[in-house]
């Protein structure tokens, strides 16, 4: 379990996160939902160790001495995270090489990721030669190559069309199941929140506070048809009701 205790963050005199307390259970996907500029991405970067915070504490109760969790972060601008001079295969192989120096072992792990993500037809193409969906799968493969404890995704599907984003969301859920990992996901999409989450955390406008934490009872494995279920409709109405302040 990851415990965020009394987290505060400011930029100059502007308070972004105000005394935030949040528990993120093991093996559960948590969605951060809230208005633009409220601090969701900043909080994600704090968890990843890419942003500092004024006071408070982040505890990883799963490891001894609460050592930091190992994260795999996927940004909204996923193309910018790919090395343009390397092929799809070499982008993933490069990250694996950070942990594995033996070439044979590195290539075996690269092959396993490429095969699992269906990237073999594109493995020798460069980022400018592939579609947004394939580029996002490559970015996911790079994050997976880090062997993280938890995936962190910052609006990872927002730049894709509905069909591609939905397909990748379902692939991502299957990957999390197969490798027994969890994810923390920032999104502005109600449907994406419902499809991906076990728990939805709704935040206020800046300075960010928690409005409500909603448990998602939809069973796994998730299917697109579940978005039309009565349970999903009830979740949708509850999220909309709690986010009226964003648009009024």
Image (cartoon, rainbow, N blue to C red):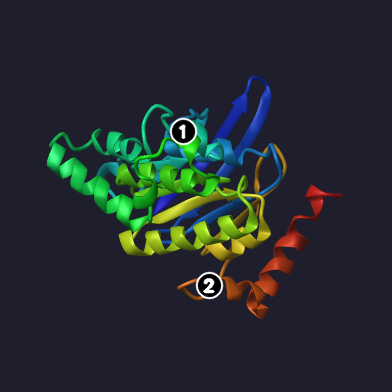
Q: Position of residue 238 (x, y in %)?
A: 71, 66
At mark 1, the secondary structure is helix
Q: Which residue is mark 2?
A: 223
Q: Residue at x 52, y 45 (%)?
A: 131
User: Which of these two is toward me, 214 or 162?
Assistant: 162
Q: Position of residue 139 (x, y in %)?
A: 43, 42
Q: Residue at x 80, y 51 (%)?
A: 245
Decide: is 242 above or below 8: below
Neighbour tally class for label 1: few under 14, some 14-19, many 20 plus, Cα within 10 Å: some
Q: Which residue is mark 1?
A: 81
Decide: is 97 above or below 201: above
The quarter of the picture where residue 42 lies is top right
The quarter of the picture where residue 95 lies is top left
Q: Position of residue 118 (x, y in %)?
A: 38, 56
Q: Is residue 218 visible?
A: yes
Quarter of the image where the N terminus is located = bottom left
Give the number of the disc on residue 168.
none
Give the left or right position of residue 50, taking residue 109 as reference.
right
Count the marks: how many?
A: 2
Q: Residue furthest bottom?
A: 230
Separation of residues labelled 2 and 1 (CA atoms): 29 Å
Q: Position of residue 38 (x, y in %)?
A: 67, 39
User: Which of these two is toward me, 103 or 240?
Assistant: 103
């Amino acid at each position: 379990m990851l415990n965020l205790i009394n987290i505060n963050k400011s930029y100059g005199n502007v308070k972004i996160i105000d005394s935030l307390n949040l528990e993120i259970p093991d093996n559960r996907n948590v969605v951060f939902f809230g208005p633009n500029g409220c601090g969701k991405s900043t909080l994600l970067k704090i968890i990843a160790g890419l942003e500092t915070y004024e006071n408070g504490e982040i505890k990883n109760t799963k490891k001894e001495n609460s050592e930091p969790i190992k994260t795999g972060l996927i940004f909204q601008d996923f193309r910018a995270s790919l090395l343009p001079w390397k092929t799809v295969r070499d982008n993933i192989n490069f990250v694996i090489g950070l942990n594995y120096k033996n070439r044979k072992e590195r290539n075996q792990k690269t092959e396993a990721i490429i095969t699992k993500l269906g990237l073999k037809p594109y493995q020798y193409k460069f980022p400018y030669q592939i579609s947004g969906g394939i580029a996002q799968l490559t970015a996911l493969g790079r994050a997976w190559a880090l062997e993280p404890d938890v995936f962190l995704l910052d609006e990872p599907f927002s730049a894709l069309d509905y069909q591609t984003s939905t397909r990748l969301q379902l692939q991502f859920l299957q990957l999390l199941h197969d490798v027994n990992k969890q994810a923390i996901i920032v999104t502005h999409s109600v449907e994406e929140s419902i499809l991906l989450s076990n728990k939805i955390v709704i935040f206020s406008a800046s300075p960010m506070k928690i409005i409500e934490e909603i448990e998602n009872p939809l069973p796994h494995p998730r299917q697109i048809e579940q978005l039309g279920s009565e349970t999903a409709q009830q979740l949708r109405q509850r999220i909309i009701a709690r986010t009226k302040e964003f648009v009024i």
